[in-house]
Amino acid sequence: MNGWDWIHWLIFVVVILGFALSMIIVFIWTERKVIGRFQLRRGPNRVGPMGVLQAFADFIKVLTKEDIVPAKADRWVHLLAPIVAFVPALLVLAVVPFRDGSILADLNIGILYVVAIGALGVVGIFMAGWGSNNKYSLISAMRTAAQVVSYEVPVVLSIVGVILITGSLSMVTIVHEQQVPFILLQPLGFLIFFLGTTAEINRSPFDLLEAESEIVAGFHIEYSGMKFALFYLGEYAHAVAASAVITTLFLSGWKGPVLPPVLWFLIKVGFVFWLFLWMRSTLPRLRVDQLMGFAWKFLLPLALFNVFLTGAEVLLWEEKMASWGNFPWPFLFLNLALAGGLIVLWSKFFRLGGGRVEV
Amino acid sequence: MGTGSELAFWLLAVLIVGSALAVVVLRDVFRAALFLVLCFFAVAGIYIILSADFLAAVQVLIYVGAIAVLIIFAIMLTREAQRGSPSNRLQIPVLIVGLLLLAVIVAVVVDTSWPAADVPPPAPTTGDIAEKLFDKNEGFVLPFEIASVLLLAAMIGAIVLVRERKEE
C-alpha cells in the first residue's frame, strides 16, 4: 500500500460522510414535503424558504433534550445500539460507485459485501429492543428478527439474476455491463429487490417494528436526545444506502445521456427514494402474518422463478449471440411480459385485506 | 506479512479471544450473544488479512446475519433469559470434556508445521473457489447437491413437526 492509496481513502471517506449526511438532510426535508403534498397539506414551510431548514431546527431541538436511560435498562447495550444501527448504512456506501472510478473500494465481491453488511443493522435494533427493558421494544425487536430473516432470502435471490447476466459481483462491472438499465431486463428482480429492501430498511408499509398505532414506537420508544437522533438519522441513512444500491444494480448507476454522471446518479437515487415515499403514502401497513405470507408465498416463488428464467436465458443467449446482434431484445420483452403476467396471476392467490392468511 | 497486517492480526486475535471468553463467562445471555456477534465479525477480519475476501463476506452474511440473529431470536423467546445462565450439575463433566477438546486442538496446532505458499494470493478468489467446488471432473458438485437436499429435508421436517394439525 503506497502513499496515494491513503489519500484516495481519506478523500473518499470524507466524500461518503458528506454525501450521506447531506443526502439524509435532503431526504428528511423531501419526505416531509412530499408526504405533505400526498396528504393535501403543505408540509414544513416556516423555517427558511419552503421549510428547507426544518431538519436543522429539529436537530437542534432534539440535541437539547434530556438524555434518558430507563432505570432497569442494560446501560451499555442501550448506549451502543444506535451506533450499531447507524454505521452499516455508511459502510454500504463504501462500494457504491458515484461515477466511473469514483468509488471508495471496488471490491470484486461488492454486492455480496452489501448484503453481508446490510444484515448488521438488525443487530442494533435487537440491542435497542432488549437493552431498553420495555415490552413494546422487545415485541418490535422480535418482529424485526422474523422480518429480516424472511426477506433476506428473496432479496438475495433477486440479486442472483443480475449476477448471472453480468458474471461479476463487482458494483463497477455491474454498472458497465448495463447497456439498458436492468430494471427492463430484470423487471421481476427489480420488483422483488425493491420490496424486499423496503422491508429490510423498515419503511412503510413494512414498518411493523415501529407501528405507532400498536407498539407505540417500537424499538426506540425509550430513546431520547442524541441517541434518538442517531436512530432517526440511521433510518434515513439506510434509505440513502438502499436507494444507491438499487440505482447501481437496476438503474445503470451513473450512466445517462447529456448530464454529467454524478448528476445522473443523484437523480436516480432521488427517484428511488421518491418511490419509497410514494409507497409509504399510498399503502396501509401490513399485519404480521400478512408480512410473512407475502415474503414466503409471493416474493420467494417469484424470485426462484426469476433465477431459473435468467439462467436459461443466459445459456440461450450464449448460443444465439451471433444471429441476434449485440443485445437480447427478445428477452427484454419476454421478461417484461412474464413479470406482468406472473404478478397479476400470483396476486389472485392473495387476499391481504381479508382474514388470517393460512401459514 | 507487513507490519500493518501483523498489527491487525494481533488486534483481531486479542478481540477474538476476549470476546469468545466473554461469551462463556458472562452471566447475561443476551450480552453473551452480542459478544458472539463481535467474535464472528473479528474472525471475518482475520479472513480479510488472509486475502480471502469472499470467505469474509460469507462469514458475516451467514454467521452474523443468520446464525447470530437466530440465536438472539431464541434468547428473546426464552422466558427465563432475564435470570442469566445458572449452572447445573453438569458443570464438572463439561469442564473435563472442554479441557480434553482444548488439549486435542492445542496438540494439533503445535504438531502441524503450517507451510506458507510462495505464490501471492489470487486476486478475485470467487472464480477459483467456484472451480474447485463445481468443476465437472474434480469438483464437489454431488456432495454439494446432497448437502442442499439434506438441508431442504431438515427444513421441511421442521415445518411438518411445528405445523398445527387441522381437526380430523
Image (cartoon, helix red, strand yellow):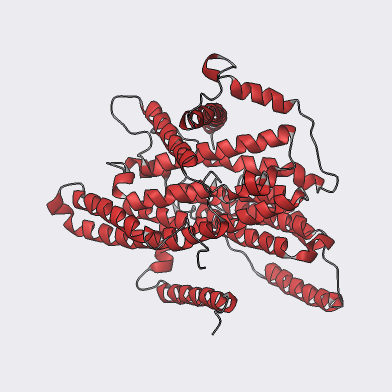
- Image point 43% across, 73% down: which residue? B140
**Residue B96 position within the rendered picture, expressed as x and y whole percent measured from the top left:** 82, 77
Q: Position of residue A203 (x, y in %)?
A: 54, 43
Would residue B157 appear left or right of A263 to someone viewing this image? right
Q: Residue at x 46, y 46 (%)?
A: A110
Image quadrant containing the N terminus of chain A:
top right
Residue A263 placement: quadrant: top left
- The residue sitting at the top extreme is A49
Depth check: give the residue in front, B155 or A221: A221
Q: Quadrant of residue B157?
A: bottom right
Query: Residue visible at 52% across and 33% down?
Result: A5
Residue drawn at (78%, 50%) of the image: A133
Furthest toward the left, the residue is: A323
User: Is residue A167 visible from the viewing direction of this image?
Assistant: no
Taking the image as shown, residue A287 lies to the left or right of residue B29, namely: left
Residue A288 lies left or right of residue A95; in this view the side is right
Q: Nearer the viewer, residue A288 or A12?
A: A288
